């Protein structure tokens, strides 16, 4: 360790751990509380909307002027959930490719950090595309952030998550550009590791949202 | 593409990972199985949504358990928390416990467990 640490010049820390990794875990911890507050708000308001559209139930006259079907689109959201789960797999493979750069057996696709970073970014963008489609269709069906309590809490929660995914995609594209420019080396593994932790966190938040918002009535 | 089953993150040349943070990472085989398990659980979640079981009182608890399992799998294996330093575990689980406690307390305070809403 001593030669490696000396050559990469990370200053010694009181904990013996890299401050950047401590920082990302502390950040993720704070994000847990942020999303818990947003999910709490959604759950508290759930079922208290006085006008439709509703998430799981049809809205019939006289509550609604015209009959409205349940608004949540489970097939599309299931697909986007699968996409986000697979993006996490691509992300761990990107990290593994950087860490194992130059090792025998990692010259192909499996060892290409560019390929896996790009794949993760594309899958993240696909998820965002699904979310954009969902939001647009909701607006066309009469649900906006101002329509009812469900709309307010739903768009706030999923919008915040989408903003996090967007930030993650930008982060991945930044890493990809660095990789293209000079090539990410094993000494850069922490940069990828930190972004991977953020990306996986975004994934686990969606796991909770998918169940609590979309599947449970 | 040699022996991918022995595909690990352990690399003595990585300085930052040698600072007591990571001792061992899952293998490629484990990553593959984690992805398969996550996909299967998601398929089951969506499948039971379209079955009469959706109207059962056990529907929500079963879904919550499956969701918790998926959450734990991603955190332990993809985020490597199972293999990481205990400080990182504390930094994640501490706020997570606070967050979950706050969520449950708020739901209780707003009567979500009383059956009125």
Image (cartoon, coloured by chain):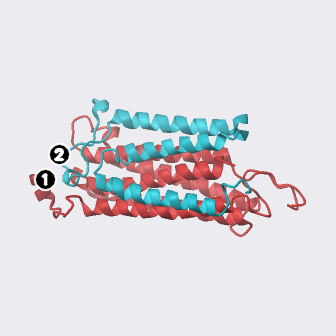
Chain colours: A red, B cyan
Residue A133 point in image, percent of width and height: 64, 55
Numbered tag placed on residue B12 in the rendering: 2
> In the image as oriented, which residue stretches furthest toward the right?
A62
Numbered tag placed on residue A131 in the rendering: none
Q: Quadrant of residue B55?
A: top right
Pointer 1 residue:
A4
Circle 1 SS class: helix
Q: Residue at x 86, y 55 (%)?
A: A60
For mark 2, name the chain. B
Q: Residue at x 44, y 49 (%)?
A: A120
Q: Is residue A160 visible?
A: no
Residue A136 point in image, percent of width and height: 68, 59
Depth check: give the residue in front, B113 or A74: B113
- Looking at the image, residue A152 sits to the left or right of residue A120; the answer is right
Q: Tell me if residue B86 comes above or below residue B58 in the rendering.
A: below
Tell me, yes or no, whether the two marked residues, 2 and 1, touch with CB atoms within 8 Å: yes
Residue B59 point in image, percent of width and height: 66, 40
Q: Quadrant of residue B3?
A: top left
Are callouts 2 and 1 both on one chain?
A: no
> In the image as oriented, which residue stretches furthest toward the bottom?
A146
Circle 2 SS class: loop
Residue A182 point in image, percent of width and height: 26, 57
Depth check: give the residue in front, B115 or A215: B115
Dot 1, crowdedness within 10 Å: few (<14), some or many (≥20)? some
Q: Residue at x 16, y 64 (%)?
A: A11
For mark 1, name the chain. A
Q: Residue at x 75, y 63 (%)?
A: A49
Q: CA distance from mark 2 to mark 1?
A: 8 Å
Q: Is residue A33 visible?
A: yes
Depth check: give the residue in front, B47 or A120: B47
Q: Tell me if residue A95 comes above or below residue A156 in the rendering.
A: above
């Amino acid at each position: 360790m001593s030669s490696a640490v000396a050559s990469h010049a990370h200053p010694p820390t009181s904990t013996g751990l890299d401050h950047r990794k401590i920082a990302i875990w502390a950040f993720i911890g704070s994000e847990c509380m942020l999303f818990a507050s947003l999910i709490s708000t959604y759950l508290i308001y759930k079922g208290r909307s006085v006008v439709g559209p509703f998430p799981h139930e049809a809205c019939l006259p006289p509550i609604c002027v015209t009959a409205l079907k349940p608004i949540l689109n489970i097939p599309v959201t299931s697909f986007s959930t699968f996409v986000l789960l697979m993006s996490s797999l691509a992300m761990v493979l990107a990290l593994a490719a950087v860490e194992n750069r130059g090792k025998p057996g990692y010259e192909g696709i499996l060892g290409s950090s560019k390929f896996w970073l790009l794949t993760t970014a594309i899958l993240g963008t696909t998820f965002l595309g699904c979310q954009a489609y969902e939001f647009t269709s909701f607006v066309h069906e009469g649900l906006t952030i101002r329509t009812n309590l469900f709309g307010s809490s739903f768009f706030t929660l999923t919008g915040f998550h989408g903003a996090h995914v967007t930030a993650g995609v930008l982060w991945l594209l930044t890493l990809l550009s660095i990789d293209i420019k000079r090539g990410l080396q094993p000494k850069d593994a922490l940069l990828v590791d930190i972004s991977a932790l953020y990306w996986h966190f975004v994934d686990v938040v969606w796991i909770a949202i998918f169940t609590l918002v979309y599947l449970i009535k | 593409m040699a022996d991918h089953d022995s595909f690990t993150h352990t690399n003595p040349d990585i300085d930052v990972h040698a600072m007591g943070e990571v001792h061992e990472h899952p293998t490629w085989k484990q990553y593959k199985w984690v992805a398969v398990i996550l996909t299967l659980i998601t398929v089951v979640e969506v499948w039971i949504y379209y079955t009469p079981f959706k109207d059962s009182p056990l529907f929500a608890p079963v879904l919550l358990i499956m969701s918790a399992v998926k959450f734990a799998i991603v955190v332990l294996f993809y985020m490597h928390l199972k293999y990481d330093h205990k400080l990182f575990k504390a930094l994640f689980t501490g706020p997570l416990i606070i967050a979950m406690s706050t969520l449950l307390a708020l739901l209780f305070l707003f009567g979500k467990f009383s059956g009125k809403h």
